[in-house]
Amino acid sequence: MVVEDFKGFWEWLIGGVNYANGAWLTFLFICVATALVAIFVGYLVAVIRHGPFEAFYVCAKVIFQAPADILGTSPRRIFAIARLSAKEAIRRRVVLVTFIIFALALLFGGWFLGTRGEHPERVYVNFVMWGAQILVLMMSLLVSAFSLPEDIKNRTIYTIATKPVRPTEMIVGRIVGLTMVGTGLLATMAVMSLAFVWGGLNHVHELDLDNPVEASFAEVNERVTGRRPSEMAIKEAFTTKSSGHDHVVEILEDVRAADAPPPADMKSVIRVEDRGNKKVYYRVQVRNVGGHSHSAIVDPNTGEISLSGAKGFFRARVPLYADRLDFFDRDGTERVKVDVETLEVQLDDFGNPITEGFNIGETWTYRGYIDGGTSLARAQFDFSNFTPDRFADSEMIPLELTLSVFRSHKGNIERRIRVGLQFESIPEDSRAEPIYRSEVLEFESEEFRIQVKGIPRNLPGSLISPKGEEIETRFFNLFEEYAKNGRLRLVLTCLDENQYIGVARADVYFRAAEGVYWWNFFKGYFGIWLQMLVVISLTVGLSTVLNSPVTMLVTICALVFGFFSADIRELTLPNRDGGGPIESFVRLITQQNMQVKLDESVQVTIMEATDRLLLRLLEAVTYVVPDFSRLNFSDYVKFGYNIGENRIMVAAVISFAFCFGVSILAYFSLKTRELAA
């Protein structure tokens, strides 16, 4: 899964070292700019109604009455209006129709989804969450767009307007009431979706053998089967088919030192042999198919092997990402990122230089690449809070990698690109303290899939003095010595000459103790609830000014803008090829290359200045509507990653801040509207 934002909640809110990058400043700027625009528009409307001089007093009166109205808002009256709004929404039967459509989709959806493809859990989760998102947002749009305008049209709102009810109570009451209806519908859909996903994916297999003991397994023969066996596999068998597939069951010959810890899962061990200073564990493993597997359990008395239900579909990985990723050149120097125009080193929010890997010609620069062979090129990951209490099994730490491969020549086509892993300690003072450096762990890369490597707690390595001299060589403890201060460095290298390994910060992480799947599933639906709140707030706010059809049209445009605001914001980045909108138009009609700099002139200077102003305005507009990518957690559930508390708090603050701002604007709009006329 692609992850580019690693900021914590407070870092996002405050902005790290550079407070100008904090969300609070952006919110303050939007509030001030929106207030100024609203006052200006309100004054123009008042001028049309009352004249220029009287308009000033009318606007001032409305503004000075606002604090008392807002602070005097009654929760009791809000609840009363919310209850009436909820009843009205239910009577419209849009909610019932939405529920029926979703139920029918689940009833017949299982016929077309199936479990034969690669990662069917992603198809199931995407189906239910995408369907729930579309239906709930459309339901919210239809119900809220017709709520207030219909009351004004039918004159039923006059009964409320003549009572001691403030405009804030009318606005907030409708938002709360419609949100209550949507919450009930969404909660029901979430429970039904979880049951649908669980029932559609969970299945069991049995071994397709008359006598499921070790002697019944066939010898592994790659030439006959045409399938590459697992490492250490010596025998194999097959399971029965279920849900359109079967699994290969292998017996692994796991050779370990006599004093080394045994395998974590001893229930899968058939027998143990002593070979002097070594022990051999013969254990059963079920090969992964379609993103899932099954646990093998061996009866110690009869030797019979039973298989558990599907494992791997219902996951909530908790990744421990690196705090920093640095790339190093062939000669061992950092590859810092430099601005092409100013030639200045680019810094992050904490003032540290940003590094980048080799560019192999890809337009998508998400991953940086490492040159292989004898060069000193490497990717260096620095982790913090690396403590044993964060892992379910502190004896074997799961490290997961998603690597990309670029071959500059064919090489050995029968073998994948080799990768090296090495661990180092990060001392407080590298000039005075020695460092622990492990031996290089070699493995073959597997592109387009997550590789899981079990890192043992004790690793062979060396203690290196500050002068680079080797002090001691033995097994060192991963937590007590390599990461004695909670900080650990992982060095990734490519071992094949003139081949490249691509990696991003989110591609390498330690998997901490996993979260609860059903709770993570409901957190994904909480993101849909936040989107629903934004839509209801925006639609109710717009309906104080516009009629129902125009309100729906403007809200749909805002939704499209919110879903693609991140992509639109990329268009406003400086130093883009072709310049701004005016410059791009000039290049288009004059047929000039986008990468050729225009001749210096007064016209070009004015054009570039105007483009910069237009781009800044476009960038500012992208922050008015919430970025829906921050409120959408479906990818985390789909790819089996836990939704962290930081992301939930960021999304909640964005949604509630938007709801608060829209409610204030709707208050002024309804306050100045002549309802009693």
Image (cartoon, grey):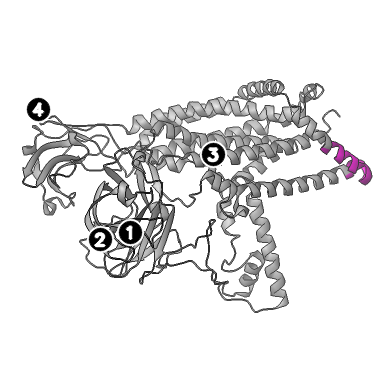
Q: Amino acid at mark 2?
A: Ile
* Residue assigned mark 1: 434
> Secondary structure under badge 2?
strand
* Residue assigned mark 2: 471
* Residue assigned mark 4: 301
Q: Is residue 51 magenta?
A: yes
Disc 1 versus disc 4: distance between alpha carbons? 51 Å
> Secondary structure under badge 4?
loop
* Residue assigned mark 3: 649
Q: Which stretch appears magenta?
A: 47-63
Percent of width and height locating residue 170: 73, 28
> Secondary structure under badge 1?
loop
Q: Amino acid at mark 1?
A: Pro
Disc 4 versus disc 3: distance between alpha carbons? 52 Å
Q: Amino acid at mark 3?
A: Met
Percent of width and height locating residue 415: 21, 61
Q: Quadrant of residue 168?
A: top right
